Amino acid sequence: MPEGDTVWLTAQRLHKALAGRILTRFDLRVPDLATVELRGATVTEVLPRGKHLLIRLDTAATLHSHLRMDGSWYLNRAGERPRGHPDHMIRAQLGNAEWLATGYRVHDLRLLATSDEAAVVGHLGPDLLGPDWDLDEAVRRVRAHPDRAIGEALLDQRNLAGIGNLYKCEALFVERTDPWAAVAAVADLPRLVSTTRRLMLANREHPEQSTTGLLARGRQHWVYDRAGEACRRCGTAIRRADQGTPPRQRSTYWCADCQPSRPARPAASRSAAART
């Protein structure tokens, strides 16, 4: 599942291939944009904003996309057949004399004035991997709802942009924090948020997502996607439960021994914990 580090790396690769070059191919395969023609324009930069991608052009326009759960961008040399997924999954292609960028199942494709980017990303909190990262502002936003479960608060992109379910679970484990604890009950919220950023920074330069420092299969994570397996700290079986309001609930993984309830977790959530 793409998270902020994946989007950051995707943006860097697209920027290197597209920025400063004239578009010789511009094909958007969504009904509202299918007739737009921008060949001849120059890509000025490709920027990540949380989980959003912004491709800016010298026409003062920006192409916005979001990877969500299943989107991806692939690069090929110009003239080569696109690789990645079947052609019917292609939603966008941008090419120049050297490179072809193909967006498979990318979502929320919009073409808007660069000056209007706030319409699609203005609601986001400080970007964990952005140059303007602001820890104090991120913490302030999380604390604005002190009774909210910290696991839900961390995933709210209005609080801090870019974090996904993997880093939420892993950061909470590293800081021994119960995912269902109220924000107000978190002993050191700035430390927790900083740990989240540290884990993401460690992975943004490569596609692998390891929070343990190990890259071997099955060794990359502390608790994420490890329900029923032994905790790497204490040996207790890792638990899983849905957290959040339907249909936006997400699987949360935690160690009940390393992340004890403070206060007690709701009974419904305890009974939902099971091996996936």
Image: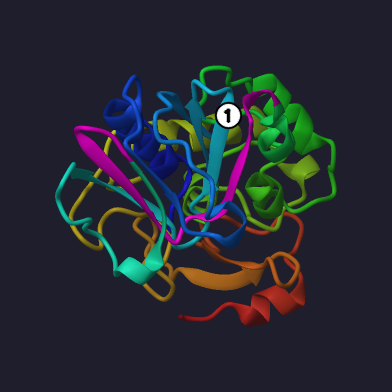
Q: Where the N terminus falls, by quadrant?
A: bottom left
Magenta stretch in the rendered image: 95-115
Camera-nearest residue between 231 and 200: 200
Identify the residue position indicated by label 1 in the image: 61
Q: Quadrant of residue 8?
A: top left
Camera-nearest residue between 32 and 75: 32
Give, as a three-letter code, the residue at label 1: Ala
Is the magenta region chiefly helix, strand or loop?
Answer: strand
Q: How is the image coloured?
A: rainbow
- Local SS, label 1: strand
Q: Is residue 138 visible?
A: yes
Residue at coordinates 53% horizontally, 38% vertically from top-left? Answer: 63
- Indicate the position of residue 131 as horizontal and vertical percent values: 51, 18
- Indicate the position of residue 80 as horizontal and vertical percent values: 14, 50
Direction from residue 144 to residue 87 in the image, left or right: left
Q: Quadrant of residue 101?
A: top left
Residue at coordinates 28% horizontally, 34% vertically from top-left? Answer: 96
Residue at coordinates 64% horizontally, 49% vertically from top-left? Answer: 155
- Indicate the position of residue 110 as horizontal and vertical percent values: 60, 46
Residue at coordinates 42% horizontally, 39% vertically from top-left? Answer: 5
Q: Is residue 253 above or below residue 67?
A: below
Q: Is residue 100 magenta?
A: yes
Camera-nearest residue between 46 and 227: 46
Direction from residue 274 to residue 243 in the image, left or right: right
Q: Is residue 129 above or below residue 175?
A: above
Q: Is residue 184 above or below residue 106?
A: above
- Indicate the position of residue 178 as horizontal and vertical percent values: 63, 54
Q: Is residue 260 above or below residue 265?
A: above
